[in-house]
Amino acid sequence: MRDRHLGFVAAAATLLAAAPLSTIFERWTWLIQCAVAVALVAGAATLARSLRAPVWAQLLGMVATLTLVLTLMFSSGEELLAIIPMPGTFAHFGELMNFAVEDMRSYGVPVPDRVGLQFLTVLGVGSVAILVDLLTVALRRPALAGLPMLAIYSVPVAVYTDSVHPLPFVIGAVGFLWLLVADNVDRVRRFGRRFTGDGRDVDVWEPSPLAAAGRRLAVVGVALAVLLPLAVPGMTSGLLSNFGQGGDGPGGNGRGTGGRVDLFANLSGELQQGEERDILKVETNDPTPQYIRFGVADELTDNGFRSGRRSPPGTPLGDGLPAFNGPDVLGVGTEQFRATIEVTEDFDMGLLPLYSTPVRIENYKGRGWFYDANQHVAYSSTSSARNQKYAVEYIRTAYSESALSRADALPDDPSLQRFIQMPENEYVQEQVDELIRGRETPYAKVRAIYNYFSSKNGFSYTTQTENGTGGTAIVDFLTNKRGFCQQYAAAMAWMVRAAGIPARVAFGFSSGSNRRDGNSFTLTNKNLHAWTEVYFGRQYGWVPFDATPAAGVLGSIRTDYAPDVEATPTVAPSTSTSAGPAPDTSGGTAAPQEGLGDDAGLGEGVGSVTPTTPKWPWFTIGAVILVLALLAVPAMRRGLLRRQRAAVGSARAGATVGADGGDPDGHRIVVTDVAAAGRAREDAHAAWAELIDTMVDYRVPIDQTETPRATADRLIKDGLVDGPAAEAARMLGRAEERARYARDPLQAGRLGEGLRAVRRAMASRANRRTRLAARLLPPSVLLRWRQAIVESSIRTVLTSGRMRDGLMRWSPRRLLTRPSR
């Protein structure tokens, strides 16, 4: 019995220790699965101990139970009797582990519900539950159980680049302290009963001074563990922020590239966020600024593109950048510009946003910066671009269509093989073979693939992608033909590789901005973009192609060699220089010809804003309308009640009564029918309630001890009503009095007319302020709402008191012991 209670405490402590995992997942599905697994494991251990099984049998029972749970939750379809795992089941578990590894590379935190990650989480938490149970119950070493619990907490600390919220750690620490207290109480109970200094018997669940001191020390220790890192500068970032995320070459790959934060996942999350945030502030002497790059994905797997190994690794940025050798090709020109880039705190990555082909970088801060000449990327695993301001001199290269058309087939260079590697996919290969049939030159093949991503072929831009059955996200996109820039860029790069031409995906910012001041402009998270880069040989280098529809990207840029496929050419192609895609001169509607402030033709681009229409008037008008609507709620509520009550009596009245309650001939009209009597009472109560509310609205004192007739007489005596209004007040009072106390209620007609007469009389004797308040903010409604709030508060206090008393009964001491008799 004692071990059973301690085992359940160990299981509950394990679930509490898993609280930090909530910072990793978007939803709570993992918690439900882990709770089921831990509960069943604890039940198996309890059953084994009740049968007095040895420790090894308890361990075997828990492992077998966890295996069955995993089999039920993540079935492969090859189980015997749908529950007994077979060899195919364990092979399926291995596949799920591989899926989990790929998901960790492809998704940034928080991650969605992915079956591989869920399997890994249930397996990990279930294994920790087994270890905690063995250490706590079987080996009686609960302090050591904190090590596997700490292993759970280390997971979000290792993968989260930002600070991990302290609340999950506090929840896990509470579970560990609960486990220690429960074990301590159990040990005391096993030893014997306790006594005070004066010999008084102390029950086992009563606190002792030593135990109370221990709990206070534990609470202080947890508080210090949570608050000290928040108070000491430099201790609020994750482990990866301090030690990098691995990678190859000096400095690793930098935060967000090749580590646990994926460029594709970051781009997808930023574009789908509703809030727009400033990221870059740029000042340049380039009259037509192009795309800014900060990362490259060149390794293609079934799950898409990701940042691969740097081969060879980068060179220290402090040693200078490689010399630029201009291309000696007719139709390819270069021009040098200078830019100053200021990065905000929202771009916390170990990657410097740069224009393509930089030749000098100045005034950057931090250590461990390297430059990859192949990717044209500056990276660091120990520093961040956050809050940096640096200067860049760069070369912008312009390509003409005729120059690229003369590019020959690439030689068999082993260093380029990794840029044409791809998974085997029959659907993609058939599509590419059909597109490039009859085309000889690399540019003709690339152009045919580029032209394929058009609306006439069914493609459309949207940030809400759809799942498919192709097995991979890229194949799903080629099937559904709905996606945004990262799908377009990755799909084109894959198809270009399928044509035997090196390709990769570049990440950066588009050139569009509505906030331009001369040579300065601001780029936000809505300007984040991805495009394809194709290699045409050493003389040409990597040439950018942006297959995303121009109308879907704020600041989209097109060139004569890669024009807008949705536009009808009306002018001759231009050869304006470009480091990325150059401004479109094909007559399309997507790209501005001059500067960045002209958004004409962008259509309904993502993040586009009309600069000539300020937003603040609309926000102000909306706020005013909202305030007026809230202020009108009491008056609307009062008007609704008044209309309901004003209708009573008139519809059901069968006769007219005088002030004495009789008909015009002096006879009293009473109701003897049971149903009619009930309706008459309802009419009288409603009319009297309206009279009381009217008195409250016009600040007439209410005496709860008065009878209805006495209240009506007081209104007349105080001069608040007179003439017909006085007769109406007497009628309302007598109708309510008889409805309360008489066996047969009085069916008095014209109650609604009487209410209106009394209200007009009271309003005529009230001051203007009182009348205005009665109309706009009726005190009767506000009083009723205040009373409801007070009653709700009282019920909440009583409920919390009952819950507190109930929780006191579930104290760890009471759970582990029986009260002495």
Image: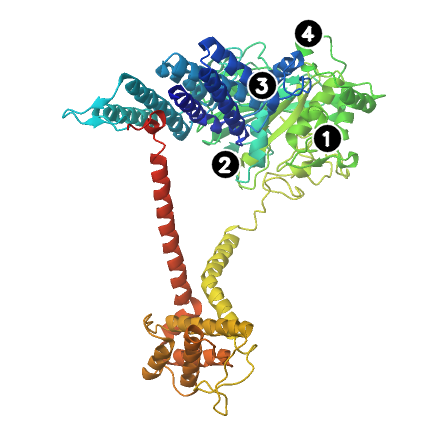
Q: Nearer the viewer, mark 3 or mark 4?
A: 3
Q: How many marks?
A: 4
Q: Which mark is residue 762?
A: none
Label disc, if present, on residue 68 of the rendered structure: 3
Q: Is residue 245 visible?
A: yes
| Number of the front mark, 3 or 2 | 3
Q: Residues within 10 Å of mark 2 (few under 14, many from 20)?
A: some
Q: Are marks 2 and 1 in contact (CB under 8 Å)?
A: no
Name which quarter of the figure residue 765 lies in.
Answer: bottom left
Dot 1 corresponds to which residue? Answer: 560
Q: Earlier in the sequence, mark 2 or mark 4?
A: 2
- Give, as a three-letter code, the residue at label 4: Pro
Going from N to C along the chain, the mark reached first, 2 or 1, is 2
- The residue carrying mark 2 is 278
* SS at badge 1: loop
Indicate which disc, 3 or 1, sits on the residue closer to the N terminus.
3
Q: Residues within 10 Å of mark 1 (few under 14, many from 20)?
A: many
Mark 2 to mark 1 CA distance (whole Å): 31 Å
Name the N-terminal-most of marks 3 and 2: 3
Res 243 seen here: no
Left or right of 433? Residue 154 is: left
Q: Amino acid at mark 1?
A: Asp
Which residue position is annotated with label 4?
Answer: 414
Does residue 405 lie above or below 639 as drawn? above
Q: Dot 4, how many residues are within 10 Å of its Cα: few (below 14), some (14-19), or many (20+)?
A: few
* Mark found first going from the N terminus, 4 or 1: 4
> Residue 70's image quarter?
top right
| Residue type beneath disc 2 | Asp
Three-letter amino acid code at the position of disc 3: Leu
SS state under label 2: strand
Which residue is nearer to you in this view: 344 or 307? 307
